[in-house]
Amino acid sequence: MNTFIEITRKVITTDDEGFKAETEEVLASVRAYREGRHGSEKWANMAAFSAATDLFRFRVIPGLEVTTDMRILCDGHTFEINSVEDVKGRGMYLEVLGTEVKPGG
């Protein structure tokens, strides 16, 4: 657990004049283990199934169900959540695969 992350969700609000604004609502701030994509055997086996760029592992947050509709903010980068998995089915840790969102035009 070497990195601080924030789990957020996109919130769209409408002002009095009907214009929509998109903001990020922080649902939780936790410590997590982050592993970038590299040439290990584990990532090679997942390469055919996922476009994920990073793996995050953190403790289950009571009262919060992490879903693919959420995002992770880490070190100034934003990651879309591709999949969420309960590690060994024990309900203690979650393993999340995420794809980095790169601003572009």
Image: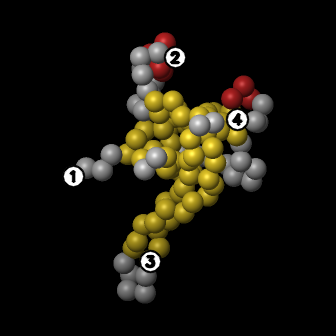
Dot in front, 3 or 4: 4
Dot in front, 3 or 1: 1
Q: Which secondary structure lies at badge 4? A: strand
Q: Residues within 10 Å of mark 2 (few under 14, many from 20)?
A: few
**Residue drawn at (72%, 25%) of the image:** 88
Q: What amino acid is at disc 3?
A: Thr
**Residue drawn at (49%, 12%) of the image:** 41
Q: Residue furthest bottom?
A: 16
Q: Give the CA distance from mark 2 to mark 3.
A: 44 Å
Q: What amino acid is at disc 4?
A: Tyr
Q: Which secondary structure lies at badge 2? A: helix
Work out whether 48 lies above or below 1: above
Q: How many marks?
A: 4
Drawn side of residue 54 relative to residue 92, left or right: left
The answer to whether the residues at label 2 and label 3 have Cβ atoms under 8 Å apart is no
Q: What amino acid is at disc 2?
A: Lys
- Residue 105 got which mark? 1
Q: Which residue is mark 4?
A: 93
The answer to whether the residues at label 3 and label 1 have Cβ atoms under 8 Å apart is no
x then y, percent, for residue 17: 38, 86
Q: What amino acid is at disc 1?
A: Gly
First in sequence: mark 2 vs mark 4: 2
Q: Which residue is mark 3?
A: 14
Q: Which residue is mark 2?
A: 42
